[in-house]
Amino acid sequence: MNSPNSAENVTICSAKGCRADAVWVLAWNNPKLHTPDRRKTWLACEEHREHLSQFLGVRGFLKDVVALEEWEASAGGR
Ligand SMILES: [Zn+2]
């Protein structure tokens, strides 16, 4: 199906070119752009979790790596 990007529950890995289902949420923050309590999130599949967290980690942006299930339970449960 050719659906527009209106779906809010897209859980595809954020790695370039990867279409795998994400299983991890990487919470990060760029102190130059964001206030300290702000969290940007990237989604990662099993394969790209390390690659993406390393990318953020070397820049000092990475705050947290949480399983997607847990993330949704804490964020969506309100
Ligand atoms: Zn991936």
Image: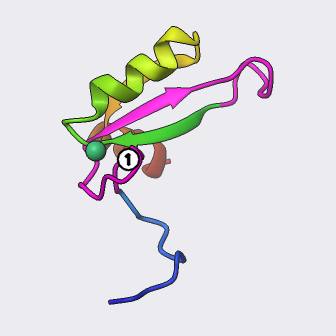
For residue 10: magenta?
Answer: no
Whether label 1 lies within 8 Å of ligand 1 gets the answer no
Identify which residue is drawn at 35% across, 57% down.
Answer: 11
Q: Is residue 43 above or below residue 1?
A: above
In the rendered view, does 38 fall on the left or right side of 52? right
Ligand 1 quadrant? Answer: top left
Would you place residue 72 above or below residue 64 in this image? below
Q: Helix or strand or loop: what does disc 1 sit on?
A: helix
Q: Residue at x 41, y 47 (%)?
A: 16
Q: Is 58 left, or right, of 48 in this rendering? A: right
Q: For the point 35% across and 44% down, which residue is it?
A: 73
Q: Is residue 74 left or right of residue 19?
A: right
Magenta span covers which residues? Answer: 12-38
Q: Amino acid at mark 1?
A: Glu
Instruction: Say whether residue 17 is magenta.
Output: yes
Magenta span: helix, strand or loop, mainly? loop
Name the image quarter holding the N terminus: bottom left
The reply, left or right, for residue 46 in relation to residue 40 is left
Q: Nearer the viewer, residue 18 or 67?
A: 18
Provide residue 21's location: percent of width, then percent of height.
Answer: 24, 55
**Where residue 30 appears, x then y in whole percent?**
69, 22
Name the quadrant containing residue 60: top right
Q: Label 1, on which residue?
A: 72
Residue at the location (58% across, 17% down)?
61
